[in-house]
Amino acid sequence: MSEILDILLSANFWAASLRIATPLIFGVIGALICERAGVLNLGIEGIFTAGAMAGWMAVWLGAGLWGGVLVAALAGGFFGLIHAILTVPLGLSQHVSGIGVTLFATSLSYFTYRTALPDVSSPPRIEAFKPLDIPVLSDLPFIGPALFQQTSLTFLALALVLATAYVLYRTPLGLAIQAVGDNPSAVESQGLSVYGLRIGAVVAGSSIMALGGAFLTMSAFDAFFFGMVNGRGWICIALTVFASWRPGKALLGALLFGAFDAFQVRLQTEVGSFIPGQVFLMMPYLLSIAALVVVARRADYPRALLVPYFRGQR
Amino acid sequence: MIRFEPREPASLGRMIAVSVAAAVVALILASVPMLFAGLNVFEAYGLMVKGAFGSVFAFTEMLTRATPLILTGLAAAVAFRAKLWNIGAEGQLYAGALAAVAVGTGMVSGPSYVLIPLVVLAGALAGGLVMLGPTLLKTRLGVDEVVTTLLLNFVILLFVQMMLEGPMKDPMGMGWPQSEPILDGAALPKLMNRMRIHWGLVIALVSTLGVYFLLKRTVWGFEIRAVGENAAAAKHAGIPVTATFVRVGLLSGALAGLAGVGEVAGLKGYLTADLSPGFGYSGIVVAMLAGLSPIGVVFAALFIASIFVGADSMSRATGVSNYLADLIVAMALLCVLVSGLFLRFRVRFIGVPRSREAAE
């Protein structure tokens, strides 16, 4: 018992929770924006990979860290645009298109990486984002190391949660995005473009997802590995349902998830000799399934999610 | 301005034309990354054709690669027909392989005509049971099966790794995480001497005919199609929707499980955690290219297999990454999705509609 308490009382544990949660925050916020507009984006897993690869490669080629972030966002937006065109004006299956985008973005990233670096045995490293040293805050006892010694991307993720909540609930654009995911013909009758809003939301959401991938190569690690996304995108899709499509709950869900993951890694070092490591590695996926089961009955899906809209058709 | 007008159900000829066109467009689009990689496109495609069809060995290798793809393609096709989104064929494949190894490495002993059916049955059962979970979660609790099947892929792969490093590890495996070899009497026989092609292909083709017959000629098949077209209407018409989903889930998972049986009991002989290079996901592309038709799945699987085998051979000759194959396959999926529009709609190009409206 005392080991568990020790874990929970260490600043290191809370810092790790926030660090693990960061890519998930980007992913859930991105998925939430797409789904609020009525489009399920299963391209997320591939968009994570593309963001991770593109961001890393831009930095490796000398674009600078924020240049890398921008390139990652643009790559995400590009794949988001493909998904948006297929599913919004063409009204094709969001499931199949999303899987297609994931396969396309993943294979294109791997192919590009292998073509640029045909024969490296160990992946080249970049100078990644460093934890910020914020005056006063970072030096606070316990709270400083727990919350304020993160990289800029973590703070960007938190800022994006606030910005998304503000735009979604407090601006006409946000209300239009919500409406387009619930009742697109009502939006059309207001003289707004359903296609424009949906395409815009999917592209913006996909750009944000890609930042989750960029965090992996530019903050969590300093290199790109094959298979490094490892289902994080799918976990975000589950967390979006768990969060009832609300930015605040999305943040909470991602943090809970991060805390659980950080906890099990530490627990593993305590009891690792009795239980195979794979049991712990399975936990995030099982936890995501459990989260879906818990909310399934009362999940309040955007009413027009998965429903294509054709102009002039009721 | 483009307008889509619904059209009559498509003829077989048009369906084939649309899939072939999608495949051709994907191959043309793939020339862009090929040029970036510094390849001569014609030469590279020449190498790929030679690598997949250039010799008896190449051709049998292509058929060997197509074997699991036919089965995972069927798994996706049958599920998608009912609009049950089983994206978990990869995990079900591993579950089937694991069960085949569990049964085939000495748990039971006996003559081949007992052992082989047992191994095959165990694999199919394991795959079906894995898919039963997400199916029941969907029908009982309304949990979206896309995400649960996707997540289970990771869980099952980790479970396989755990078994291979623990209770099922081969003590003679020099420390490698691999299972004991399948008994000779439990292995699927080879179809040709000195080639890797095995009886899994026969299982795949028989399964194809079985699924074709099921969908075309049986009440269950009719129910599957009815549920896929409109679950609410099917329910209203008295079709047991829940039972249909469960049957489809079991069948789809079992087919993917059989793919795992073939790979482990027909090809590799023992199980490792890198048994499948994504056959489960490629199966989705196979099914979509086939227009969800079981017979079409065979041809689509042959196409996808020749891309993979051809690209491997091209990659060895030129040094360009064989991720090119995955790229072509992914583009084929997106292309066939778009070209499907030409089946369901007559596409009309209309000039400047706005001004005409204004004039009227």
Image: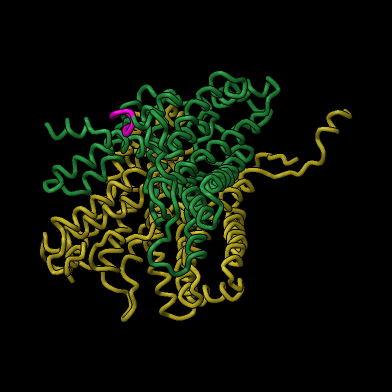
Residue extent of the magenta highlight? A140-146
Instruction: Tell me if residue B194 comes above or below residue A232 in the rendering.
Output: below
Quarter of the picture containing the C terminus of chain A is: top right
* Image chain in yellow: B
Give left or right: position of B19 versus B274.
Answer: right
Report which colour depicts chain A.
Answer: green
Residue at 33% x, 38% y: name it.
Answer: B135
Q: Position of residue A152 (x, y in %)?
A: 46, 38
Residue at 81% x, 41% y: name it.
Answer: B351
Q: Position of residue B114 (x, y in %)?
A: 16, 63
Quadrant housing residue A190: top right
Determine if the magenta segment contains residue A144: yes
Give left or right: position of B237 versus B107.
Answer: right
Residue at 31% x, 54% y: name it.
Answer: B93
> Which one is nearer the viewer's eye here, B119 or A127?
A127
Give left or right: position of B1 versus B213.
Answer: right
Scheme of image coloration: by chain
Q: Position of residue B282 (x, y in %)?
A: 43, 56
